[in-house]
Image (tube, rainbow, N blue to C red):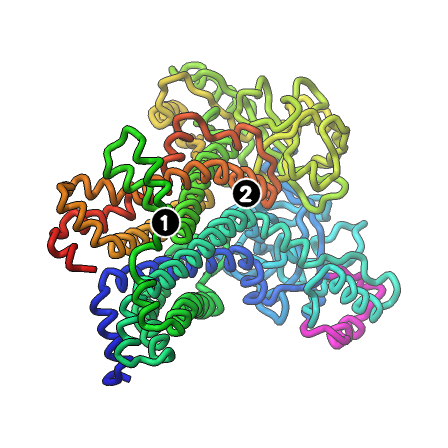
Amino acid sequence: MRGSPVGQAVRGGVARRRVQTVVIGLVLLVSTGASVLALALVVDSSAPFDHSFTAQRGAHLAAVVDPARATPAELAATGRRPGVTAAAGPFGEVTIAPQIAHVAGANGFLPPMTLAGRATAGGPVDDIVLQSGHWAQRPGQLVLASNPSSNEQIGLPLGAKITVTGVPGRPTLTVVGLATSVTNSADGWVVPGEVARLRAPAEPAAVQMLYRFRSAGSAAAVRADAAVVSAALPAGAVTAVQSYLAVKMQETSRIGPFVPFLVAFGVIGVIMSVLIVANVVSAAVVAGYRRIGILKSIGFTPAQVVAAYTGQIAVPAVAGVLGGLALGLVLATLLLKQAANAYGVGALGVPVSVGVAVPVAMLGLVGVAALLPAARAGRLSAVQAIAAGRAPRAGHGYAAHRVLGRLRLPRPVTIGLAAPFARPARTAVTLAAVLLGAVAVTFAVGLSSSLSRVVTGLSQAAAQPVQIGLSSQNTFIMDAAQQRTVVAALRAQPGTRRYVAETDQQFAVAGLTGQHPLTAFRGASAWTGYPLISGHWYTGPGQADVSTGFLTLTGKAVGDTVTLSVGTRPMPVRIVGETFAGQGRGVSVITSWQTLDAANPGLAQPDQYDVGLRAGTSPAAYSQALGRTLGSRYMIFGNSRNSPVVTLMLGLIGTLTLLLAVVAGLGVLNTVVLNTRERVHDLGVFKAVGMTPRQTIAMVICWVAGTGLVAGLIAVPLGIALHHAVLPEMASSANLGLPASYLDVYHGAELAGLALAGMVIAVAGALLPAGWAARIRTATALRAE
């Protein structure tokens, strides 16, 4: 084809229309890169748990079995039942009441822990991943689960010792390892022979069986699989089961907030890319109608015309798509590395399906966008094609010129403002592209502001920038003497405005599995910075404020009474407020010291003090001075507003917004280049009658400035609506509600600036061709047509 007439036409077209070739390549490069990045993030944000579950051979079902009712042979036989692909166990299981060693009474209390006896970390099901330390090798050693949901409030380091209460001899366990089970099969692991020694006299024996099934994609499928296992054992042998789907729901709540805004940006990016690519390619073919007529006049057949112009588009298109794929892979690799750390999974990469589907879709779009107008041009006669390739048809835009000409504006401005009406279809596509870019900017600005408020609300950093605790590894509870020392230091320290003692405990409640965080304050605490969504802050004993996740999962509402299990006793409370709080995966309770102490006398002992500072006081300088007063036994730490997850979100928002704005700007650039080429003779006439270079630039910029302004004005309400729709979805994915102030982030001056975003994008895209139009000489312009 290289020496054929078609090949020569392709090479000539590419060389002759260098600006058009570069624009097509750039548009496809940025569009492909943005699409690869957005889709990779969307796919990986919805599947980190699945990735780890597959890698660690997670258990679809964990069954607790009474060994008195099922023999080892019967248990082994369950692994051969239809649908079972792998089984592990039996592992002895025991639930212990632990206490920090050498810390008497309630000060050393820890939540109940379920331990399993396993000789090794590996296995055909639930391959435990050791994070630090080593596996338990002899009695007295404990590997503690480091899963956030299992050990978030325990936080014992390697070497820590716990005492098992309620067991003869009160055996002591030393933490020798921290490990992760993707399905949270236990809170910790010991050697198999240790389980019997840790079991309380009245506690029945239990063993754990773990299964993987051929089909376990839904709750109904898992229930059916559980029924198959239960039917293979004597009646009553299976005493409890846990589906991996419940664990998956908890784990994915951490990353759920990413998905709504990534989908929003991804959809905007894909639609914008489709519009601009189709517009750029089809307009490039339409702009070549005059040359098509010339080719037909020298003997080109319709098929050769179609081949010549699709080939002319294909050269920069393939280069742009391949470059965009490389760009998308690089950006996605960098951002997915951060995402993997935030999600808590080993590694994330661009799925092969995304790397293949996006380039194929882009090239397919280019092919369709080029073939349709080229085929239509191929059917025209030479005379018709030459006529169709001239400037817009007579009558298009003349009314707009007459109306705008009556305005008291410079003539170059009115000519430019009327120009879009000459090509209404092209203008509509350009307006849509700029509109989407401006929507993305408006959405991104609001989302960034809301996320900043979310970080402040979740950390309480603005209200209590300094916190004080103990630096000891064995206990975090302050005794009476330590409390007096801290209070005296706070009262003597300049800059102290107020402070409150805090204790952090765990609670259980009917309808929810596991333990969840409970915070109790001693003294006035309404100032501590927990935003309220509804109701009010507790005002007396027996009242509590709870998170949105607590209300959602328990079915309770503000005003209801609920009984919590804290320590060893029930604690009835009346819910008086709904708080914006993210502890415990969105399930938490805040109450008063008196409420906790009434239910569990002696349990309300402070583990930290929260400090509010006077205006103008530096938290860093205050912390250093207080640290010198208290000494190394106490830990002074700033309540940071930094959040790795939110930092990652803000980085993604900024990157995606910039890419979308660039894509929109390139679409404008293409439109102005085509308009300039079509009107080059007019430019020569204008220059001949005295239009200066500055007036030429103003006229060309006004070709798209009005379109950009209209797009920006429409984009503001659309961007706000998108923000108000996506942010609650992000919060809901994390079991959070939102205070109204977190949505009300757009204000007067900011809205006025955002309304100009479309015009800024349009003007930025028009600057380059406007400069070219200003520099062209009059004689050259008059000869160009």
Verify CB contact (< 8 Å) between mark 2 and mark 1: no
Q: Amino acid at mark 2?
A: Val
Count of numbered circles in the view: 2
Pick whichever, 567 or 125, lies toward us.
125
Residue, x 65% and y 29% (percent of image)? 578
Q: Earlier in the sequence, mark 2 or mark 1?
A: 1
Q: Is residue 67 left or right of residue 348?
A: right
27 to the left or right of 264: left
Q: Quadrant of the N terminus?
A: bottom left
Residue 154 spot, x, y in % from top left: 58, 43
Which residue is depicted at the point 22% across and 73% down? 12
In the rendered view, tell whether residue 559 sits above or below residue 235.
above
Is residue 542 toward the left or the right of residue 382 in the image?
right
Distance Cα–Cα, label 2 vs label 1: 45 Å
Residue found at the far right of this picture: 235
Residue 337 can be seen, yes or no: no
State whether residue 167 is above or below residue 602. Answer: below
SS class of the residue under badge 1?
loop
Residue 726 — which label?
2
Q: Secondary structure at mark 2?
A: helix
State yes or no: residue 102 in magenta. Answer: no
Give whichever of 709, 466 is nearer the camera: 709
Quarter-of-image position of residue 537: top right
In reply to whether residue 81 is colored magenta, the answer given is yes
Q: Quadrant of residue 358?
A: bottom left
